[in-house]
Amino acid sequence: MEKPIRIVKDTMIGIRLPDYSRHSPIVASVLGKNPGPFTGPGTNTYLIGRGRRPLILDTGAGVPVYPDLLARGLEELCASRELDKIVVTHAHGDHLGGVRQIRPRFGDLAVLKMPWPGHDAIAGAPITPLADGDEVTAEGATLRAVFTPGHAPDHLCYYLEQERAIFTGDVILGAGTTVIPDDTGDLGQYMNSLKRLLQLDPDLIYPAHGPVIRNAREKIREYIAHRELREQQVLDALRAGPLQVMAIVKRIYIDVPEFLHNAAASSVRSHLRKLYKEGVVAEEEDNRWRLN
C-alpha cells in the first residue's frame, strides 16, 4: 500500500465565511476581514454570552472596516451596542491587533490574556493576567483557560463548559494546519497541547480561522496523526543522507504550491528542533541535518 503524503488534506485557500454568524444561543462570530493563505477568510472574533453585554474573544488584526462591522454584528446578533470585556488567545497581531479599535468604540474594556512580555504592547492597553485554569464569565457562559503553548508561548485555549466546546485560537484551525513559528514556537509543546485538548473530550471546536468544527475529537486526533506523519517523513528523508531544510521540504511537500514552501520550511525546522532535543538528529556546519 502506498504511504500517505499527508493526513490533513483540506486548506484555508478559497474558504469563504459570512461577515457575521450566530452559532448557538451563546456563541456568535464577526469576521476580522484579514484574509490570507494562513488566516483563511480572516480571524474569527467571537461574541460569547446570552445577555446584551457579551465578551469578545480575539479582536482581529486592526483592519479599518472591522469596527463598523463589529458594531453591525453586535446589533444584529446580540441586539446590543455594548461589550463586557476583551479576552485574547495569544499576542499575535491578528488576534490582539484590534484592541486599539475596539476600546475607543466600546469603552475602556479590560483586556484579559496570559501575559507575554515584549509582545503585548500592540494592544495599547493594560493586560489583566490570565493563567491556566482561570475562569472568565459572561451571562450564561463560563470559559476556562487552558494553557496550550507551542504555536505561541502565551497561547490559551478556552473551554466553554455549557457546550463542551473549545475556542482553540491557532492551535487547531477550521481547515489546514497551523504554523509553528521558527522563533517562538515549540513543536514538542504543541504536541502536548493537542493531547491536552483531546483529554477534555470536546464536542465542538470554535477555531480562530475557518469554519466551526463539529467532529472535535476526530479533528484533534487527525492533527496529532498529521504531525506524527510529518516527523516520520523528515526521518525518512534524512536516511538518504544529510540534507538542508529546503531539500527536505521538496521531498516531503510534493503536493504543496511552491509559494508555501517557506512556511513548510518553518514546520520542518520545528520538527528538526524537536528531534534535536530528543537526541535523534544533529545539525552540521553547512546547515545540513543528519540522523544521529
Image: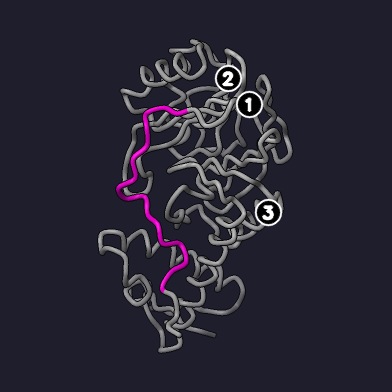
The foreground one among 30 and 115 is 30
Task: Verify CB contact (< 8 Å) between mark 2 and mark 3.
Answer: no
Report if residue 12 lies within the magenta region: yes
* Amino acid at the residue labelled 3: Arg
Horizontally, residue 138 falls left or right of residue 21, namely: right
Quadrant showing the C terminus? bottom right
Q: In the displayed structure, would residue 240 be above or below residue 148?
A: below
> Callout 2: 10 Å neighbours few (<14), some, many (20+)?
many
Q: In the displayed structure, would residue 85 be above or below residue 171?
A: above
State how far apart marks 2 and 1 are (Cα).
18 Å
2 or 1: mark nearer the eye = 2
The foreground one among 263 and 28 is 28
2 or 3: mark nearer the eye = 2
Q: Which residues are magenta?
A: 5-21
Q: Which residue is mark 1?
A: 128
Position of residue 12 measured from the top left corner of the image (x, y, whole percent):
36, 50
Horizontally, residue 116 falls left or right of residue 129, namely: left
Task: Verify CB contact (< 8 Å) between mark 3 and mark 1.
Answer: no
Mark closer to the chain start, 2 or 1: 2
Position of residue 188 measured from the top left corner of the image (x, y, whole percent):
60, 62
Position of residue 285 measured from the top left corner of the image (x, y, whole percent):
41, 78
Q: Residue 54: which numbered mark, if any?
A: 2
Q: Which residue is mark 3?
A: 196
Residue for point 60% across, 33% down? 113
Mark closer to the chain start, 3 or 1: 1
* Amino acid at the residue labelled 1: Thr
> Callout 1: 10 Å neighbours few (<14), some, many (20+)?
few
